[in-house]
Amino acid sequence: MAKAIEAKNIFFSYHKGVLVLQDVSFDIEEGEYAVILGHNGSGKSTLARIIRGLLDDYEGKVILFGKENPTREENSQINSQIGMVFQNPDNQFVGSTVEDDVAFGLENRQVPLEEMKAKVQEALEEVGMWDNREKAPENLSGGQKQRVALAGVMAMSPSLLILDEATSMVDPKGKRDIYKTLHALRKRSEGKLTLLSITHDVEEALSADKIIVLKQGQIVRIGKPEEIFSDTALLQECSLEAPFAYEFKQALKKEGIKLDCPHYSLEEIAEELCRK
């Protein structure tokens, strides 16, 4: 399978002599949902910005869809394939209404008016925000703002979506809504959308295909959620805890209750238990 991202021996420092990233290497395949997991200060957001092309004074190689070390200025074609949603959605809003904001990127690409209207409506419906299209972004809740920011990116039909702590300012219900939206978007893309989430939220990481654990600028483990959260020594080393949903599912397994739900959300577990 083709690779969406290849990071090879990445080194980066903001101040001379102080390394933020040290010899970071990993691959993410097209259509994969990968999570870079680590505490604040581990270097994960810096890594996301390097991948996105927002930082270019690093050592090593970043290959995106087969193109080596592309930046926003140097490779507009690659740039158009990548969308990014940041921690604070207020920093991304430029329109006076939700509808105007989602249309902004399409207008810059000179998308024909009727096509643009259709794309805006489709993106807002996908994230459940079409009924709020005439509202000002500043009047929305945190979860609603993040969904509008996501709609603005998805309207551009990216091949790679990067979420940089995109749910850290959202309440639990807002997080669940965003996760459901992301799963729906991936399903509709039929394996064409690659998702990279930068987070310290272990609950979110449970739904990933691959977890890349980062500690003090270095990768300490790459594996599937089951491999990561069953490694108690690794969790202790990185000051992480296994998600409650994972531990609950494992406890059920010990009691002879096996579940077939693909993810570890408590809602899925509860629904399947009710069906048994």
Image: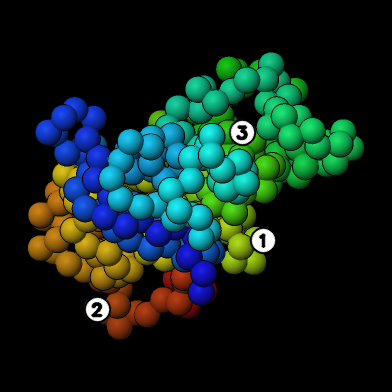
Name the residue at 22% across, 35% down: 13
Give SS at disc 1: helix
Please report the residue visible at 58 percent of the width from the left and 33 percent of the height from the top: 149
Give how far across and how far down residue 179 sits, in percent.
50, 50
Q: Nearer the viewer, residue 149 or 193?
A: 193
Mark sitting on residue 148 = 3
Between disc 3 and disc 1, whose residue precedes?
3
Q: Which residue is denoted by mark 1 in the rendering?
A: 188
Q: Nearer the viewer, mark 3 or mark 2?
A: 3
Q: Is residue 165 above or below residue 221?
A: above
Residue 246 seen: no
Above or below, 16 relative to 95: below
Mark 2 Cα within 10 Å, few/some/many (few <14, many 20+)? few
**Nearest the camera: 198 or 247?**
198
In-image side of 258 versus 159 (left or right): left
Q: Earlier in the sequence, mark 3 or mark 2?
A: 3
Residue 189 in percent (x, y) is at: 65, 61
Q: Earlier in the sequence, mark 1 or mark 2?
A: 1
Residue at the farthest bottom position: 256
Q: Amino acid at mark 1?
A: Arg
Judging by the rendered image, the residue that carries numbered circle 2 is 254
The residue lying at 54 percent from left, 64 percent from top is: 31
Q: Position of residue 157 (x, y in %)?
A: 67, 48
Number of numbered discs visible in the structure rendering: 3
Q: What amino acid does circle 3 point to?
A: Val
> How busy is the neighbourhood of tag 3: few (under 14 within 10 Å), some, or many (20 plus)?
many
Q: Tell me if residue 107 comes above or below residue 241 in the rendering.
A: above
Q: Which mark is residue 168?
A: none
Residue visible at 16% across and 44% down in the picture = 216
Could you classify mark 1 by the number of other residues whose Cα lies within 10 Å: few (under 14), some (14-19), or many (20 or more)?
few
The image quarter containing residue 76 is top right
